[in-house]
Image: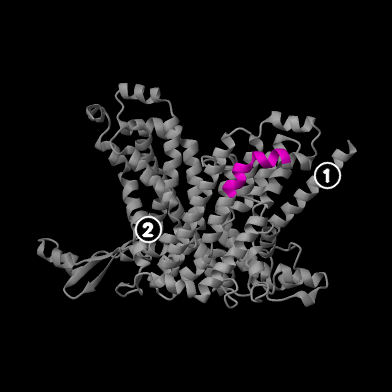
């Protein structure tokens, strides 16, 4: 204890706190306090402009029977399944193809070109896709061009296609951040491993399955986690493309329902309850993944 | 040998197809932005031979205000994130004081709070930052300030209105000074700066910790204060990391859409994301002008990317492997 005291005197003392103070104040006001506030609001009926009224867990009971929320959760699971089955792997395909380019210079240029769509503002991407699905859009025009005019429909207003249309926003999903991550993973594989595979006569596909894929597992894992977090929290695209989650509740997602409750219906308490449920889901997922990874790491340490 | 050439050919073709599909929406946007409405219907797929630049003039008139607000918001936010987070990270990474480690974890823990949980309550907090002070009453009691009571405070210049949290109005006895956050650009900037802290502190603290201690010891022996060490030693060496943080913050703030949607209600104070959405709905059918607006909205980030491609390609993957 004494020792600590003495080193404290030779240390920076309150000056350290002074350096951290602005950050600390900002975080308390705009992150910690709102998070704590959310926990409290979720258990109260709080219409905007009114006084909070304690209702206990009533919001959560209502939520579990709320057909809109349930429809949203189902849609979310479908979006998630698509993102994990297709969206997660397309950038890997692009990264592999770029990785196989002949010269370093070409690889660099290709990466630079494929990253450009990432710096296009998301709102522009969504508006452009809204245009693509519109009556004057490219999908309709293309079907007319190839003589399949009878397939044409309001892609975002037809209950059969609306959710599918949302899934395909950003197709073919090859560009940007995930591609960079995959590429970084591929270029981290040591040259000797790649050479060994080549000498053993592994085909491109064989090398991919038995060398590349196992070596970039950390990247796949990271992007899978980011995909889940992003899809669960993402509702801006839905807001821009279909507005209210329509037709009916065909494209409703929980995040949008939270937004509507909070900012269209002024039901701040109910909105916070939805936010809290999603936070718990995200937290459970994150902790689950961590536990799984830890288990896997311990297994890996044992004799093979 | 021939098989190898064939497979490499196939790879190039596949990459070309993927690239074309990925870029088609944006190429189409640029091509549409140069077409008049009749040409849009007549010549749908191919780029125009006679660019209809009027679209850009029309879109620029509509969008320039939003663009200016976005540039102000993003640059002030980037500056705020860099200054505050680097100060904190320097203390957490290089200084010795009681509670340092706990403080570090407390800041990093913010990364676990998802934005979706705090959207509604942060809105309530920002909405609650609304104070009015009866300045007129006080000023009346102070000798020499009689004029302020009679004439009121000077009017805020037009250009500063979007930025100003202060306004004033008459109520009964005299002037009130009104402070509020909602519907001003500060309602965007302050939460953005706060939201950028955790990630930036995390990256910068890691960086400062790996810097050689001798550097700072010798500076200290030369009599450099902690502030000077921060300013003249740590900051210049951290430039690449700061660049990464700046880019990520710029991208994030430029793209943010829901937060301005709920906090800004005066159209003149909208940023590019919400402004572009309004532009899109107002101009139903004027595809050329809409596309031109979208091109203009994309340009600042694309130009930034072209100026710093190398930093960008390296920087975006930094910090992603520390999981």
Vertical placement of B123 versus B234: above or below? below
- Where's residue B93, x and y in %? 38, 35
Q: What kind of element bears circle 2?
A: helix
User: Which SS does the magenta portion mostly show?
Assistant: helix
Q: Is residue A211 magenta?
A: yes
How far is the residue under mark 2 from the one under mark 1? 54 Å
To which chain does the residue with label 2 belong? A
- Classify residue B103 as left or right of residue A295: left
Q: Which residue is mark 1?
A: B9
Report crowding for label 2: few under 14, some 14 to 19, many 20 or more residues within 10 A (C-alpha): many
To which chain does the residue with label 1 belong? B
Q: Quadrant of residue A86?
A: bottom right
Q: Which residue is mark 2?
A: A35
- Where's residue A184, x and y in %? 62, 40
Image quadrant holding the N terminus of chain B, namely top right
Residue B292 visible (yes or no)? no
Vertical placement of A32 versus B323: above or below? below
């Amino acid at each position: 204890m004494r020792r600590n005291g003495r080193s404290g005197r030779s240390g920076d003392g309150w000056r350290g706190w002074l350096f951290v103070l602005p950050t600390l104040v900002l975080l308390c006001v705009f992150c910690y306090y709102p998070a704590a506030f959310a926990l409290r609001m979720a258990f109260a009926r709080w219409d905007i402009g009114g006084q909070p009224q304690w209702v206990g867990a009533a919001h959560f009971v209502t939520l579990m029977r709320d057909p809109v929320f349930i429809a949203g959760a189902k849609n979310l699971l479908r979006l998630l399944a698509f993102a994990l089955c297709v969206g997660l792997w397309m950038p890997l395909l692009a990264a592999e193809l770029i990785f196989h380019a002949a010269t370093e210079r070409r690889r660099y240029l290709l990466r630079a070109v494929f990253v450009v769509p990432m710096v296009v503002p998301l709102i522009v991407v969504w508006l452009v896709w809204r245009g693509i699905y519109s009556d004057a859009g490219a999908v309709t025009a293309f079907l007319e061009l190839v003589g399949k005019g009878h397939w044409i429909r309001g892609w975002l207003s037809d209950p059969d296609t609306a959710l599918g249309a949302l899934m395909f926003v950003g197709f073919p999903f090859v560009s940007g951040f995930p591609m960079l991550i995959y590429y970084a993973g591929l270029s981290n594989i040591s040259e000797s491993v790649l050479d060994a595979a080549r000498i053993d006569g592994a085909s491109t596909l064989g090398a991919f399955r038995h060398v590349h894929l196992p070596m970039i597992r950390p990247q796949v894992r990271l992007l899978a986690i980011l995909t889940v977090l992003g899809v669960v929290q993402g509702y801006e695209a839905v807001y821009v493309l279909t507005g209210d989650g329509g037709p009916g509740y065909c494209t409703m997602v929980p995040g949008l329902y939270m937004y509507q409750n909070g900012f269209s219906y002024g039901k701040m308490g109910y909105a916070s309850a939805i936010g809290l449920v999603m936070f718990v889901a995200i937290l459970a997922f994150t902790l689950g993944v961590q536990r799984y990874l830890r288990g896997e790491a311990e297994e890996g340490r044992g004799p093979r | 040998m021939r098989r190898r050439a064939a497979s490499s050919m196939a790879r190039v073709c596949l990459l070309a197809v993927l690239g074309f599909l990925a870029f088609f929406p944006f190429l189409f946007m640029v091509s549409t932005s140069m077409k008049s409405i009749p040409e849009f219907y007549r010549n749908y797929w191919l780029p125009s031979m006679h660019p209809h630049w009027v679209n850009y003039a029309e879109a620029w008139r509509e969008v320039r205000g939003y663009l200016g607000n976005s540039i102000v918001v993003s640059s002030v936010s980037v500056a705020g994130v860099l200054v505050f987070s680097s100060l904190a990270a320097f203390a957490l990474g290089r200084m010795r004081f009681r509670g340092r480690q706990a403080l570090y974890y407390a800041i990093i823990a913010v990364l676990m709070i998802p934005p979706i949980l705090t959207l509604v309550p942060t809105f309530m907090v920002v909405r609650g930052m609304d104070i009015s002070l009866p300045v007129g009453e006080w000023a009346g009691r102070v000798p020499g300030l009689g004029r302020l009571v009679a004439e009121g405070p000077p009017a805020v210049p037009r250009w500063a209105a979007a930025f100003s949290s202060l306004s004033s109005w008459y109520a009964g006895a005299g002037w009130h000074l009104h402070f509020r956050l909602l519907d001003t650009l500060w309602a965007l900037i302050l939460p953005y700066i706060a939201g950028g802290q955790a990630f930036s502190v995390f990256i910068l603290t890691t960086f400062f910790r790996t810097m050689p201690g001798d550097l700072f010891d010798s500076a200290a022996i030369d009599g450099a204060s902690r502030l000077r060490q921060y300013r003249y030693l740590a900051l210049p060496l951290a430039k690449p990391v700061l660049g990464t943080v700046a880019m990520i913050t710029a991208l994030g703030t430029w793209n943010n859409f829901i937060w301005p949607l709920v906090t800004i209600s005066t159209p003149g104070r909208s940023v590019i994301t919400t402004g572009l959405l309004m532009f899109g709905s107002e101009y139903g059918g004027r595809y050329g002008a809409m596309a031109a607006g979208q091109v203009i909205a994309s340009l600042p980030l694309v130009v930034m990317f072209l100026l710093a491609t190398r930093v960008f390609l390296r920087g975006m993957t930094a910090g992603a492997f520390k999981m």
